[in-house]
């Protein structure tokens, strides 16, 4: 349970969960029926190891805009990978791997090939 301070800021710490490739739903709820966070849900959430690819503006370049997207997109079958975008409002958008950007996809493939 989290409680907002005088400025309206709050933080919650989640207990560790076992890693799982089974998609879950993360639900945020409030006992206050007028709260903006009343039963907000994020679906398709995985629990486990997190690798973050970041960098220059090309990291936001969608795979569909790559010159070789017709070849790469059909083989981008990594259902356990997620891409998130952090906006200035700290709103996280989760997308399947088929929409992941080209640079991150190539880096992920190299890492997985080494393992």
Image (cartoon, grey):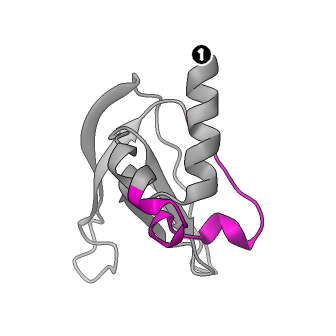
Provide residue 71's location: percent of width, then percent of height: 42, 52
Q: Which residues are magenta?
A: 50-70
Where in the figure is residue 106, as x and y percent of width and height?
60, 44
Q: Where does residue 9 sit, x and y in percent of width and height?
A: 59, 72
Please determine whether, in this image, residue 38 is positioned above or below residue 111.
below
Task: Report the residue marked by disc 1.
Answer: 115
Which residue: 28% across, 62% down? 29
Q: Which quadrant, please, contains the C terminus?
A: top right
Q: Residues within 10 Å of mark 1 (few under 14, many from 20)?
A: few
Q: Is any atom of residue 72 visible in this view?
A: yes
Residue lying at the far top of the rendered structure? 115
Q: Quadrant of residue 89?
A: bottom right
The front one of 54 and 6 is 54
Q: Position of residue 19 (x, y in %)?
A: 41, 24
Position of residue 67 relative to residue 44, above or below, is: below
Q: Secondary structure at mark 1?
A: loop
Please indicate whether residue 80 sits to the left or right of residue 85 in the image.
left
**Rendering quarter of residue 110:** top right
Whether residue 96 is visible: no
Q: Is residue 55 magenta?
A: yes
Going 40% across and 50% down the picture, which residue do you hit?
97
The correct choice, above or below, for 9 with respect to 113 in the image is below
For the residue pair 89 and 32, the one nearer the viewer reads as 89
Residue 58 drawn in magenta: yes
> Is 11 situated left or right of 58 in this image?
left
Please give the name of the residue rendered at 39% of the width and 22% of the height, measured from the top-left corner.
18
- Tell which residue pokes out farthest to the right in this image: 56
How many dots with numbers?
Answer: 1
Q: Residue at x 39, y 60 (%)?
A: 70
């Amino acid at each position: 349970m989290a409680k907002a301070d005088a400025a309206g800021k709050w933080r919650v710490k989640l207990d560790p969960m076992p890693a799982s490739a089974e998609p879950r739903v993360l639900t945020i709820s409030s006992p206050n029926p007028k709260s903006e966070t009343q039963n907000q849900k994020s679906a398709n959430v995985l629990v486990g190891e997190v690798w973050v690819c970041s960098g220059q503006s090309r990291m936001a370049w969608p795979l569909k805009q790559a010159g070789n997207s017709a070849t790469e997109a059909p083989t981008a079958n990594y259902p356990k990978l997620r891409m998130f975008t952090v906006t200035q409002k700290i709103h996280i958008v989760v997308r399947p791997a088929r929409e992941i950007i080209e640079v991150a996809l190539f880096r992920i493939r190299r890492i997985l090939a080494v393992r």
